[in-house]
Amino acid sequence: MSEEMNEEKTLFDDFEAETPEETALISITSLPKIVENLHALRERWSGYAKDAAAMICTEETVQSLKKSRAEMRKEFDEADAQRKAAKAAYMAPWEAVEATYKECVSDAFKEADGILKAKINDFEGALKEACKGELAEYFAELCAANGVDFLSLDTALNIGGMKIGISDAKSASQRKLKKGLAAVVENIVKGIEQINAMPPEDVAEIMSEYKTRFDVGDAVATVQARKRRIEAEREAAEKRKAAQEAREAAVAKVDAVAPPTTENADFEAVQAAERMYKIAFTIYCTKAQGLKVRDFLKQEGIRYE
């Protein structure tokens, strides 16, 4: 392989060129001609691969293999440079066409389309606003007739999964939307009636939740969960209070039999030491602490049961 590469020729010398432009493998001729030249070179590059597979790399031959590889890399780089140059030459005219197309067609289309879109949106938007104004009047009368004073038109449309479309806006009566709004208000009234039938102490709280959720079951569940949390906190507070009172009572019992601490209590202290008292109280401690209390009582000669 190295002998072939040492010859001063290019990849393209195997082909007879009718013109100087056809000397290179990849030149501005035609795509079929380029493909034909590439197929003709397949055997040559396949031969390089076979030669490389047959070579043995040893301490004596490693430098020769490196030289062969460098020569082959140089030949490949030359071919690849021709490929890139030909591609750029082929693409340049088309890129110029693309730029002209963008200027003459694409940009002009976007400008015209944007103008028409804005005009259509403005027109249809005005129709929708007019439709919403008519619906607002109808909805206000509907709520007043049913005693519902906390519901907005937008909220009712959202509850009913309704949107004011252009087809609805073009309709003089908006029957479909009005029918949907009537159904929403009817369900709201039924929900209010259900809540009013509940225990009086819960009505206000559940109604407050219902006005934000518009779902009786969800409102009731939310209130009940909140009540359970409050009750749990109340019970925990009572337990903490009872435990504190028990601790204070135990301390008070101990203090009741403690020796006087006044400066003139020597005589009383002697008398108190001669009397025996029975004191009952409960202590809360770990096992290790309990053993220390027992040892202390034994050390002081205090009888305990």
Image: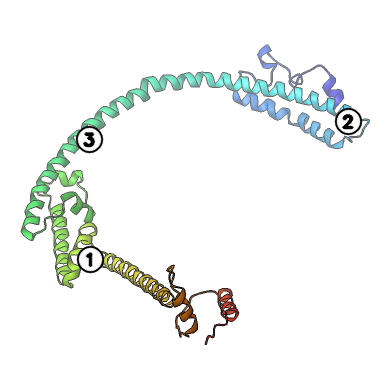
Specify how the rendered protein is coloured.
Answer: rainbow
Q: Is residue 297 above or below residue 66?
A: below
Residue 59 locus on image (x, y percent): 92, 32
Local SS, label 3 = helix
Amino acid residing under circle 1: Val
Residue at point 18%, 73% (across, down): 199
> Which callout, 1 or 3, points to the residue nearer the camera?
1
Amino acid residing under circle 2: Val
Q: CA distance from mark 2 to mark 3?
A: 76 Å
Residue annotated with mark 2: 62
Residue 113 locus on image (x, y percent): 29, 29
Circles 2, 3 touching at the beta carbon (< 8 Å): no
Residue 257 locus on image (x, y percent): 43, 78
Residue at point 35%, 69% (across, down): 237
As drawn, which residue projects farthest toward the right? Answer: 60
Q: Is residue 138 above or below residue 91?
A: below
**Can residue 160 be seen?**
no
As drawn, which residue projects farthest toward the bottom? Answer: 305
Residue annotated with mark 3: 121
Number of marks drawn: 3
Left or right: residue 25 versus residue 97 is right
Q: In this orientation, which residue lies closer to the viewer: 204 or 146? A: 204
> Which callout, 1 or 2, points to the residue nearer the camera?
1
Residue at point 16%, 51% (across, down): 152
Which of the two discs, 2 and 3, labels the residue nearer the N terminus?
A: 2
Density class for disc 3 (Cα within 10 Å; few <14, some 14-19, many ≥20) is: few
Mark seen at residue 216: 1
Local SS, label 2 = helix
Q: Is residue 27 above or below residue 192?
A: above
Left or right: residue 151 versus residue 237 is left
Density class for disc 1 (Cα within 10 Å; few <14, some 14-19, many ≥20) is: many
